[in-house]
Image (tube, rainbow, N blue to C red):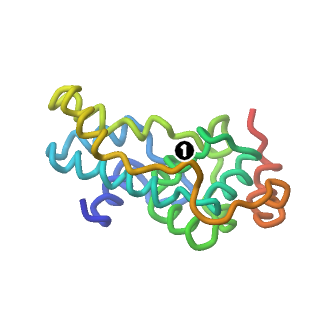
């Protein structure tokens, strides 16, 4: 799926052009994917995996760590899904100026689990499983998964320096403690 089309589907699932609005919800993404052909759902799933893999970097980890006030390995995966669900602007922002991501955070992001969009990862898989059967969908998914290393790419930094390097996100996290 071409990159522009992928982001159009995400934008339609978000239902708004407001960059500070909440990320796409799984039910809204499902509605968008159900309108596509099987081939396009598979292509969307592949592109989604590529986007997650491209965000598997220490600078993105650090931004999520600062914004959330801490992060586990699972939290990092779900944060990357949140970024994709938040849209192309959020992904571009975290790639070019991670601390500037603070400009795209809204009230919904301050809610408990605000950066956790794990369910978005499974929407295309679920749509495919319903259409072509779970065995074939699982086989496609195994093929589609991007090779994931143990650690993000780039240079790992000490957690004690993250708030200093991402002061805006750290300040946002202090102002919006999770429940």
- Residue 91: x and y in percent read 51, 62
Name the side, left or right, on which 150 lies relative to 62. left
Front in this rendered view, residue 117 or 15: 117
Q: How many marks?
A: 1
Q: Quadrant of the N terminus?
A: bottom left
Image coordinates of residue 53 in percent, x first then y, are: 45, 55
Q: Is residue 138 left or right of residue 119?
A: left
Q: Please tell me which residue lies in front, 120 or 157.
A: 157
Query: Is residue 47 positioned above or below 141 on the image?
Result: below
Residue visible at 37% across and 51% down in the picture? 48
Q: Quadrant of the C terminus?
A: top right
Residue at the extreme front? 150
Q: Position of residue 114 (x, y in %)?
A: 62, 41
Residue located beneath label 1 in the image: 77
> Secondary structure under badge 1?
helix
Residue 56 spot, x, y in % from top left:
53, 56
Name the residue: 85% across, 55% down.
160
Residue lying furthest bottom in this view? Answer: 96
Question: Left of 2 or right of it: where is 37?
Answer: left
> Would you identify the image quadrant in which residue 7 lies?
bottom left
Q: Is residue 94 left or right of residue 25?
A: right
Residue at horizontal 69 percent and vertical 66 percent from the top:
99
**Residue in the foreground of this view, choosing between 160 and 28:** 160
- The residue at the point 43 percent across, 54 percent down is 16
The 10 Å Cα crowd at callout 1, few under 14, some 14 to 19, many 20 or more, is: many
């Amino acid at each position: 799926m071409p990159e522009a089309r992928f982001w159009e589907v995400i934008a339609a699932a978000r239902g708004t052009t407001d960059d500070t609005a909440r990320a796409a919800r799984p039910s809204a993404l499902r509605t968008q994917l159900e309108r596509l052909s099987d081939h396009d759902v598979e292509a969307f799933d592949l592109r989604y995996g590529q986007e997650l893999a491209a965000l598997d970097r220490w600078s993105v980890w650090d931004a999520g760590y600062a914004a959330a006030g801490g992060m586990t390995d699972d939290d990092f995966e779900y944060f990357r899904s949140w970024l994709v669900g938040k849209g192309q602007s959020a992904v571009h922002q975290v790639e070019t100026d991670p601390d500037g991501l603070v400009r795209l955070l809204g009230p919904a992001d301050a809610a408990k689990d605000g950066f956790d969009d794990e369910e978005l990862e499974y929407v295309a898989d679920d749509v495919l499983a319903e259409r072509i059967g779970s065995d074939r969908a699982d086989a496609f998914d195994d093929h589609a998964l991007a090779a994931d290393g143990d650690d993000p790419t780039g240079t790992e930094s000490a957690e004690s320096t993250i708030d200093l390097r991402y002061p805006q996100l750290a300040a946002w996290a202090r102002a919006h403690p999770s429940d």
